[in-house]
């Protein structure tokens, strides 16, 4: 009815701003100042729309024009300061993004969004940094809000894909990257992410296939190549380290397996499978304290019967490891037969018998006497099926009259070699002995 009235456009712009429809409001505000360049409130509203949409430079020009018309206008002065603050936050964020200081970028974008609540660019940058920080639900929420308003926003589609990619949902992530590239074929970040996602998926699957086929060397190489694709993908890399650790354990490279599992839990300290794999490697290398620590962590997280049993087994082995290792003292395997135990005792008892070392120094005699007693003690336990069973099961040997302080190593030796007069050491030269049996 009155298309040339600047105030009407200005009023409608104000109403649209109240509704959060800043892009439409900007058009009306610009029309109002085209009709009347001296319309101060029109310039203020144009600047406010530019600022809300994140175009701080254009906002500065509008507020400057308002101040030229009314240099004492308090609103124009404040908004001009706000626009310059947003310009400064943008500069800092750009520098910090290059430094990979994502927390500071999020801080700057939060401050900028207080003045520019409708700026998709700021929201996307914030969401991308949240994803890089592993705060995926927050990043997803920001991207989803944008997509509800603009389902074709390539940047938001990219961020949605990025979150899924970093959560190891690679197939779904690829779908979002492809959709982003459909909307913006030159979207460089989506292109790189899509390429990395496809490469990671292929390498991991090839590694899994090689592992299942028993080709552990190839599996190791493929997992290693996959780990070099994207160091930022923490969750997938944690799984790859754990997988490679499993390969190393199959190759009996247990220390390498422990290192891989340690890298996995450094990346994801909730990764139960990596703790379990590392704990088993600790058990296999007789590092029982470390195994107990890992099984405790697992059991605290998932209180299952299986995990409880694994913890009990590790605690038992730890307890056993702190006793004398009778198998080691005799130099036999834990599965040694009765004959092997007897042969080992004969060899070690003769080696450490005090008479053999009668010409040695007092210190050597004392050490050899100690070893002789330990050999006798080991034979006493391992040659008795009942005692051996209790020892192997980790039970205390002092119970049920098995006090090891009561035995006499010499009596065991005499009984084994046929009693008094059945055995003697004789010198055959300086430092040499031969054994004579009666």
Image (spheres, rainbow, N blue to C red):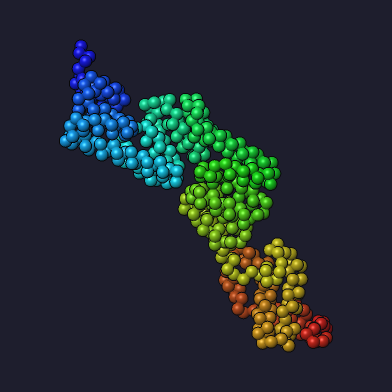
Q: In the image as oriented, which residue stretches furthest toward the top?
A: 1
Rendered image quadrant of residue 159: top left
Q: Position of residue 344 (x, y in %)?
A: 74, 71
Q: Does residue 380 appear in the picture of this structure? A: no
- In the rendered image, residue 95, in percent from the top left (x then y), is placed at 41, 43
Picture quadrant where residue 418 is located: bottom right
Between 131 and 348, the one nearer to me in the picture = 131
| Spot occupied by residue 236 in the image (x, y as percentages of width and height) | 54, 42
Residue under the point 26% across and 30% down: 62
The quadrant the C terminus occupies is: bottom right
- Total tally of numbered discs in the picture: 0
Q: In terms of image quadrants, where is residue 31?
A: top left
Query: Is residue 433 or residue 144 the one in the foreground?
Result: 144
Q: Residue at x 80, y 83 (%)?
A: 432
**The N terminus, quarter of image:** top left
Q: Is residue 321 above or below residue 63?
A: below
Residue furthest out toward the left: 72
**Whether residue 82 is situated above or below residue 300 in the rendered picture:** above
Q: Residue at x 50, y 28 (%)?
A: 186
Residue 154 visible in this rendered orientation of the protein: yes
Residue located at (75% from left, 78% from top):
350
Towards the viewer: 121 or 384: 121
Q: Where in the figure is residue 64, as x and y percent of width and height?
A: 25, 33
**Along the line of sight, the residue nearer the viewer: 236 or 425:** 236
């Amino acid at each position: 009815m009155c298309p040339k009235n600047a105030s009407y456009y200005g009023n409608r712009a104000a109403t649209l701003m109240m509704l959060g429809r800043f892009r439409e409001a900007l058009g009306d505000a610009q029309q109002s100042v085209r009709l009347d360049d001296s319309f101060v409130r029109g310039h203020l509203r144009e600047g406010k729309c530019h600022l809300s949409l994140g175009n701080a430079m254009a906002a500065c020009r509008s507020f400057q024009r308002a101040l030229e018309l009314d240099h004492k206008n308090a609103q124009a002065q404040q908004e001009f300061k706000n626009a310059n603050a947003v310009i400064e936050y943008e500069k800092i964020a750009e520098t910090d993004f290059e430094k990979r200081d994502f927390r500071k970028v999020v801080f700057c974008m939060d401050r900028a969004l207080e003045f520019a609540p409708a700026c998709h660019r700021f929201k996307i940058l914030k969401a991308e940094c949240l994803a890089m920080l592993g705060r995926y639900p927050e990043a997803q929420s920001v991207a989803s809000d944008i997509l509800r308003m603009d389902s074709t926003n390539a940047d938001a589609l990219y961020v949605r894909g990025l979150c899924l990619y970093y959560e190891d949902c690679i197939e779904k992530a690829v779908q979002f990257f492809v959709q982003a590239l459909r909307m913006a074929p030159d979207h460089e970040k989506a292109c790189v992410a899509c390429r990395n996602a496809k490469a990671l998926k292929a390498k991991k699957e090839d590694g899994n296939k090689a592992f299942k086929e028993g080709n552990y060397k190839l599996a190791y190489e493929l997992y290693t190549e996959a780990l070099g694709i994207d160091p930022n993908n923490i969750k997938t890399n944690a799984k790859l380290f754990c997988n490679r650790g499993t390969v190393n354990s199959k190759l009996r490279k247990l220390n390498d397996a422990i290192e891989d599992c340690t890298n996995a839990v450094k990346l994801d300290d909730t990764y139960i499978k990596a703790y379990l794999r590392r704990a088993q490697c600790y058990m296999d290398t007789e590092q029982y304290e470390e195994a107990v620590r890992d099984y405790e962590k697992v059991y605290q997280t998932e209180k299952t019967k299986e995990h409880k049993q694994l913890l009990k087994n590790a605690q038992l082995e730890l307890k056993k490891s702190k006793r004398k290792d009778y198998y080691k003292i005799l130099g036999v395997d834990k599965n040694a037969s009765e004959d092997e135990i007897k042969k080992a005792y004969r060899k070690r008892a003769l080696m450490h018998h005090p008479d053999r070392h009668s010409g040695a120094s007092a210190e050597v005699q004392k050490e050899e006497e100690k070893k002789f007693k330990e050999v006798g003690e080991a034979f006493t336990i391992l040659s008795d099926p009942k005692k051996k069973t209790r020892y192997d099961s980790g039970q205390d040997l002092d119970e049920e009259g098995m006090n090891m302080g009561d035995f006499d190593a010499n009596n065991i030796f005499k009984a084994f070699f046929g009693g008094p007069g059945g055995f003697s050491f004789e010198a055959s030269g300086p430092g040499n002995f031969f054994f004579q049996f009666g």
